[in-house]
Amino acid sequence: MPITVVVADDQAMVRDGIATLLDAAPDISVVGQAANGREAVELARQRRPDVVVMDVRMPVLDGLAATQEITAVDGDPAAGTRVLVLTTFDLDEYVYEALGAGASGFLLKDAPVEDLRSAVRVVAGGEALLAPSVTKRLIADIARRRRERIQGRPEAFADLTPREVDVLRQIARGLSNSEIAEELYLAEQTVKTHVGRILTKLGLRDRTQAVVFCYENGLV
């Protein structure tokens, strides 16, 4: 089955261009386009796409607010839908707010076409999009500034076993499950189990939020 995608951008030419580029990939199918954040939320609710490619600055409802609605667990408007924020702005606050709103990835619009397609695949697969160096740099910088205001809280990890802390530290480094398995001499299925338990214990949505959590709480 192809990865289903909704593209949200208030500029028609940009929106159509992104949709065309994604639709050209044999494993990706664009099932809708939205001109503002409210339309994106409605399309996510109606069509339950795997991924919403979301612009930040849009009328009616901006991309950050729309992301928060789409990824809300309690409201559940689009259970299972993940958000890839795509924007021309690389300002730190946009990255942090996007991840805090529940986005699974952040990519700049000047990224190569194949990077965009790869990002959609990564996010649809349940992974965090941390590969682009700009994203890692901004997350680290935001976390550094937040650590100046928030002291490290060891108790934040009190519910985790020592092995789960080891796994979490590798997640914060951006390693995949297979890479963590190799690093810690574990079976990949065991790592997957640890990751699921870590996210549940910490009340986190995905690996992206786990990385931010680690930086905020001084684990890395």
Image (tube, rainbow, N blue to C red):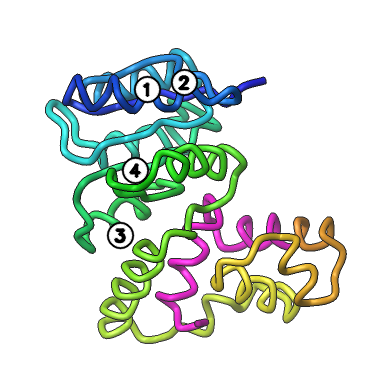
Question: In terms of secondary structure, what is the magenta stretch mainly?
Answer: helix
- Is residue 105 on the magenta stretch? no
Q: Name the residue tied to disc 2.
A: 23
Q: Earlier in the sequence, mark 1 or mark 4?
A: 1
Q: Give the alpha-carbon distance from disc 3 to disc 2, as whole Å.
A: 29 Å
Span highlighted in magenta in the image:
194-220
Callout 1, which amino acid? Ala
Q: Name the residue tied to disc 1.
A: 19
Q: Are marks 1 and 4 in contact (CB under 8 Å)?
A: no
Residue 132, x across and y down, in percent: 42, 59
Q: Give the alpha-carbon distance from disc 1 to disc 2, as whole Å.
A: 6 Å
Callout 3, which amino acid? Tyr
Q: Name the residue tied to disc 4.
A: 85
Q: Which of marks 2 and 4 is nearer the N terminus?
A: 2
Q: Do the residues labelled 1 and 2 touch (CB within 8 Å)?
A: yes
Residue at (79, 68) in percent of width and height: 181
Callout 2, which amino acid? Asp
- The secondary structure type at the circle numbered 1 is helix
**Residue 96 marker:** 3
Q: Give the alpha-carbon distance from disc 1 to disc 3, as whole Å.
A: 26 Å
